[in-house]
Amino acid sequence: MRELKILAVVVFFTIITYIGVEPFAHSQMHEHIKPVDYKYSDLKPLNKKGDPKKGAETFMNAGCVGCHGVKSQGIAAPMDAKSASASFGVVPPDLSNAGAIFDEKFLANLIKNPAHALMLEHKFNDKRPFPMTPFMGLGGDLDQEVADIVAYLKSIAPKKLDDKDVFIDACGRCHDVKYDGWKRPSDTEALKKYMGKNPPDLSIIIRAKSKEHLINFIGEPQRVLHGTSMPRVGVTKEKAEQIISYLEKVGDRKKEKRESVTLKIILYFVIFSIFAYLWKASKWRDLH
Amino acid sequence: MAHFSKANSIGEWLDQRLATKKLWKVLAAEYWVPKNINFLWAMGVVLMTMFSILVISGIFLLMYYKPDVHLAFDSVNYTIMQEAYYGWLWRHMHAVAASVVFLVIYIHMFTGIYYGSYKQGREMIWISGMLLFVTFSAEAFSGYMLPWGQMSYWAAQVITNLFGGIPFIGPDLVIWIRGNFYVADSTLTRFFMLHVFLLPLVIMAIIGLHFYSLRIPHVNNQDGEDIDFDYEAEKYKNGQKRESKVIPFWPVFISKDLFVVGVFMIFYFYLVGFHYEFAMDPINFEPANPMKTPPHIYPEWYFLWSYEVLRGFFFDIGPFKAMSIGLTAFGIANVIFFFLPWLDKSPVVAPAHKRGAFKYWFWILVIDMIILTVYGKLPPTGANAWIGFFASITFLALLLVVLPIITKKEAKSVGGAA
């Protein structure tokens, strides 16, 4: 009984200290961030219904392929990675999967005003224009044309993408994942100049940042890190979760093993403790 | 030359040459420990277990670790954590044990304080234990640098910088410790040497001293009772186990310890597999970047109380700069416990709950050190800074002023009664 009382005191002070230095201290150190809902409610909704067939035409006429490749449709990127990153800072994305990865409302706004949709207006303005030019329309109803392009991109996008593909399209043009052998196509020096700093390797970012932090940061970088040069990439919530799942697979690839192995070790010590207790009881029986 | 007859077994053969039977008796089978103890007396064996885990896991990590600023981070986070078989297990075990070992050290220390096990002949046990605390601290600090993550780098930066506050030699000392003008590859390699060679060697030697220091004054007991160990041991050997106040280390004492170790291991491995962030700070999974200061730099939890004593003095007082006062207070905080046997002026060896004012002193000290620990991590702004200041003052006052006064009174009243 006395032993249990002492144990309770030790456990009590240990828990108080733990709560103080971990959950409590961390709640004081990091400001609370309103979770990002991936609804892109700051952007104007897409009111028109797009027609993918017309969109294909508009897409070609709008000059998108002057910079973007669409591999799945047999349209190669007009420049190799090196010259593309020399011209733009970062290699422009191939649009084969864009319709599946990015939110449609985001895409529509991006086509019309990239710096705004990407939340990079603190970096890009009239003096320093964003490398992607806003689409001004082909003379018809601008919103209809934009809706058509978005419908086209959605129509050509694959239904299913694996986690790594999503990551590469959404993040992999700027970020390396060297523990998974992924090397960004953009040239590092050009990228540094364009971004203001070298975007970090994301191999074990999952151990450095919480999932909650990452999901908010991907959804709206400015909300988490004000003034960052990382754009809002505009992925859907589902695709953001795929990105996280990829990062977890790469950065914490022993998770399953860790949990199953330590469970077995714990079980071993439970049995060990039972036998140790019996041994103790046998040794102490004739002492009192 | 001694005469050797033919041995009938390996045991006998060894005994003839090494006196193994006698050695075993001296070390274990007839090494006497009081019977009147509780599970807190098992912390020594728990610590020994943790230290063994640290050494063994450390050996495995050492096979893959590369002490070079360009290679260290990946050798830890890729080679060890992802490539080598069970490398992740050794790393998690090592990191969590390094943190948890301090929890047990603190429990062990406060057990000693509570039961008065640092005086009346037990001073050397206490001092060698404090030496272990200091060397373990150095071991932990040097090890924390090795993964070369953000916190490794910046903690090294901040802590080595502290030595710059020492009068006259400070600035040169910092360069000498770092091996460069800033924390660099030379800093990593020398701390690597300290971590894997010199400090473990010193720790093992002090552990030997610590064990040896128990021999003459013997282990204390739950009531601080002065036991005649020879007399009680005779009783035990004569079969009066019930009446004897002592038990042999082997197998009686150790049988209880093993049970405590088993239960502790369940807790420890739960932390290793499922709850390790407290010991493996997420920030340290970002590679060291001298160009990017993390928004919050803090030491590991077990250094927080003394770190807060350093930070607590945040304003200049008269001609003294805040930094100098803080550093002085920090210096005092780090050595003050060595002097506990003399700051306590009372000859009474008894548990705190039987010592009147000392009881309150003890619990206020525990609470104050927890406050220091928590506020050592919080940003030192606004009210936090003032709480840190008062907690630091309280800490120094408790040890330097209050303890001598209340124990002097206690000594007087005991003297009067006797």
Image (spheres, rainbow, N blue to C red):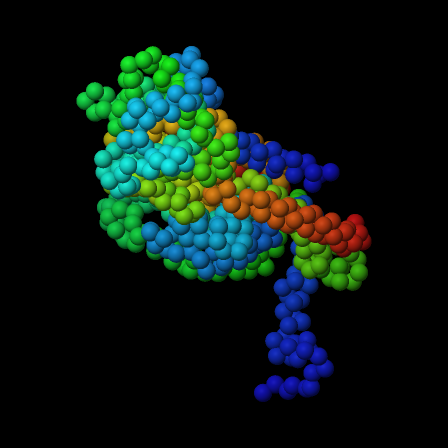
Tell me the residue at 57%/34% (across/down). Answer: A15
- Is residue B384 visible from the viewing direction of this image? no
Identity of the residue drawn at 61% across and 36% down: A11
The residue shown at (60%, 33%) is: A12
Q: In the figure, B49 relative to B300: above or below?
A: below
State which quadrant residue B356 falls in.
top right
Q: Is B69 left or right of A40, judged from the image as shown?
A: left
Q: Quadrant of residue A134?
A: top left
Q: Using the image as rendered, state which of residue A32 and residue A261 is in the foreground.
A: A261
Q: Is residue A86 left or right of residue B227?
A: left
A100 or A245, which lies in front? A100
Q: Is residue B171 visible?
A: yes
A226 vs A201: above or below? above
Q: Quadrant of the N terminus of chain B?
A: bottom right
User: Picture coordinates of residue B7 (x, y %)?
Assistant: 69, 83
Residue A283 position, x and y percent, is 76, 55
User: Percent position (x, y) of residue A69?
Assistant: 34, 35
Residue A77, image x and y in percent? 31, 37
| Residue B244 found in image quarter | bottom right
The residue lying at 33 percent from left, 51 percent from top is B69
